[in-house]
Amino acid sequence: MSNLYIGLMSGTSMDGVDVAIVDFSKIQPKVIAFHTLTYTAELLQKLNQLCAANDDEIVDMGQADRAVAMHFADAVKQILQQTGLQPAQIAAIGSHGQTIRHHPNGQHGFTLQIGDPNTLAVMTGIDVIADFRRKDIALGGQGAPLAPAFHQAVFRHSKHSRIILNIGGISNITYIPKSIEQDVIGFDTGPGNTLMDAWCKRHLGEPYDHNGHWAASGNRDSRLLQQLMVEPFFAQSFPKSTGRETFNLDWLDNHIATLAQSPSAESVQATLAMLTTCTIASQINVFDDVEEVFVCGGGANNDFLMECLENELVEVDLATTNELGISPDAVEAVAFAWLAYAHINHIPGNLPSVTGAAKAAILGGFYHRN
C-alpha cells in the first residue's frame, strides 16, 4: 500500500484550504508538497453567513457542503498536477472539512464540519477519511483539539519538554512532556488571529494585518485588555475548546461599548494582539518544565505577534516549526494527513488527556472513491 497521504485543512480563519502531500514511509513524515487554495469571495460569504443563524440556513448549508467539497477537490487536483502524481498513488485523503458550528458542551453537544466527503472522493478518485471530530464527542470529549496526537507522534523529544503552539483563527497549545510516563495535554487558549483579522477587514478592507504592521502602529489600551480578559473561557480548566461562536466582532463591540471612551482602531488592533499573546503566555507558563515552544499556523507569520510572544515568554526558547522540519503553514494539513494514516493503520487519533473523551479511538469515517 502507498505511504502517500493528502491532508486537507481549513480552519476558523476561513481563508481557504491548505493541502499537503505527505510521505509516511519513515518515522519522520516528509512533506512532498504544500499548497493553499483561497476560497472564492462568493463561497467565503456563504460560509460566514452559516456561522450564525439565518433564514433558510439548512438549504444554504446543503449547498455549501457540496461547494466546499468541490473546492477541496480542486485543491487536490492542483497539487497532484504540480507534483506529477496520480490519484492511484495516494493511499487516502484526510479531510477536516470546514467548521461552521462548534458547541461541544452539554447533553447534546455537537460539532459540525461541511465539505461532503462523498463528493470529494468521487471528484478526486481517491478514498477519503473525514468526520474526525464527532467520534470524540460521542465519547464525551470536546472533539478538539485533535492535532496533539499528531504532535506527540512526530514532535516528542526524550530530553526536552516542549509545547507546540498553533495560532490559527483560534490558538491552541500541545504540551509534550519529555517523559513518556506523563500525559500529553492540549487545549484551546482563546482567540488567535480571528479577532485581529475581522477587525482589520472592517477598518482596512484587508483580510489580515500583514506582519502585524497595523497593530504595531497603535498602543494597546489597558482598559480594553482588562475588560476582554474577564471572558469566562480564559478561566476554565482544560479540556476546553472554543471558536467564532464566542470570539467574534459582536463580542468585541460589546466590550468596547462599556468603555467611557472608545480607543482608536489601531489601538484596538494592538490590544487584540496583546489579548492573543497574554492568553497564550498565561497558559504556557503553567507548565514550569517547558524549555521549547514551537509556533505554527498563520500567526507564525505575524512579526509583531511573534515579538510580543518573545517578550512574554522569556524563560523558553521560541521558534517556529521550521526548526522541526515542517513549515508553520503546513502543520495542520500534515496533521490531517496523519489522521488519515492513523485511521488506515488502526491507530487512535485522539488523546483523552486532551479532549476529555472516555477513551482513545480510531477517528473518522471511510468514504470509497468508487
Image (spheres, rainbow, N blue to C red):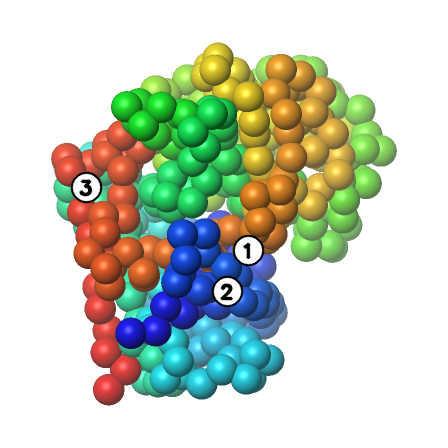
Give how far apart the Cα atoms at labels 2 and 3 are: 26 Å
User: Label 3: few (<14), some or many (≥20) within 10 Å?
Assistant: some
Q: Which of 255 and 350 is in front in this view?
A: 350
Q: Residue sitting at 49 percent across and 82 percent down?
A: 85
Please provide percent x and percent y for residue 39.
Answer: 56, 68
Q: What residue type is labelled 3?
A: Ala
* Contact check, label 1 and label 2, Cβ < 8 Å: yes
Q: Mark 1 points at which residue?
A: 330
Q: Name the residue under label 3.
A: 360
Give how far apart the Cα atoms at labels 1 and 3 are: 25 Å
Under circle 3, the secondary element is loop
First in sequence: mark 2 vs mark 3:
2
First in sequence: mark 1 vs mark 3:
1
Q: Mark 2 points at which residue?
A: 20
**Left or right position of 64 against 361:** right
Q: Is residue 85 above or below residue 289?
A: below
Q: In the figure, residue 33 lies in which quadrant?
A: bottom right
Q: Residue sitting at 23 percent across and 48 percent down?
A: 348
Under circle 1, the secondary element is loop
